[in-house]
Image: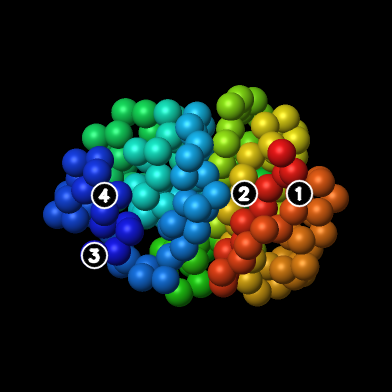
Amino acid sequence: MSPFFVTVLSVNITMQDIRYDFIDKKGNYDLLDKYVKNKSLRRIIDIGAWWGPWTLWWCNRAENVEIFEPNADILPKLQHNLKKLPHCTLHQTALGNTSCKVNMEYENHTGTYHIKNTEGNISCKKLDDYEFENVDIIKIDVEGYEIPVLQGATQTILKNKPWIQIEANNSGERYGRTKRDILTFLDKLGMNRVYKRWPDQIWNFDN
């Protein structure tokens, strides 16, 4: 039995209760576990939630979970999967470095939903606008849009000094960015990369 299924069972949800497109067997849902296993987690943030696998893994570990997902096609499944989790709050918006309206599209499946341009009708906001406090973990999986999301989350990161799990692959090339841009950005914030397992990286501040 995988770690994902163990956690699902611990929140009294069975696989029969879950709606999903498919299960990513290589999903790094447990990647942060060894770093925070003895910590009391107050608020965690899931940016790019898809149908909720990362949230379902972590939801019983935190007092509050803030979930960001703009994909109207996947939202019914995500809402269904969260209905027994009152401490999880769903925000039906994309995140970036400004408040605007965006157009989004798939590359080949719902897990590759990404921002195409800023000429659409889908809400996009900055994480900083929410003024979240007590943030212990931020997970970011936004199909190449990591830098704008980080730019719009800078004050939240500097104020809360959370652990960050971030996807870093070649999908940023569609925006003219590389994986190294993520390293450079987080390094300038004073963070350290402590671990990586493709395609994700783990970052934190010196405590």
**Is mark 2 in CB contact (under 8 Å) with mark 1?**
yes
Q: Work out whether mark 2 precedes mark 4 in sequence or the reverse, and give the earlier one.
A: 4
Q: Work out whether mark 2 precedes mark 3 in sequence or the reverse, and give the earlier one.
A: 3
Disc on res. 191: 1
**What's the distance in space between the residues labelled 2 and 3, CA to CA?**
27 Å
**What's the distance in space between the residues labelled 2 and 1, CA to CA?**
9 Å
Quarter of the figure that contains the N terminus: bottom left
- Residue type highlighted by circle 4: Val
Q: Work out whether mark 3 precedes mark 1 in sequence or the reverse, and give the earlier one.
A: 3
**Residue 201 located left or right of residue 49:** right
Q: What residue did someone put label 3 on?
A: 1
Q: Work out whether mark 3 precedes mark 4 in sequence or the reverse, and give the earlier one.
A: 3
In this picture, is 99 found above or below 69?
above
- Residue type highlighted by circle 3: Met
Residue at (76% x, 49% y) in the render: 191
Q: Work out whether mark 2 precedes mark 1 in sequence or the reverse, and give the earlier one.
A: 2
Give coordinates of residue 22: x percent, y percent: 30, 67
**What's the distance in space between the residues labelled 3 and 4, CA to CA?**
11 Å
**Residue 199 located left or right of residue 5:** right
Q: Secondary structure at mark 4?
A: helix
Give coordinates of residue 16: x percent, y percent: 14, 54
Which residue is farthest right?
188
Q: Residues within 10 Å of mark 2 (few under 14, many from 20)?
A: many
Disc on res. 164: 2
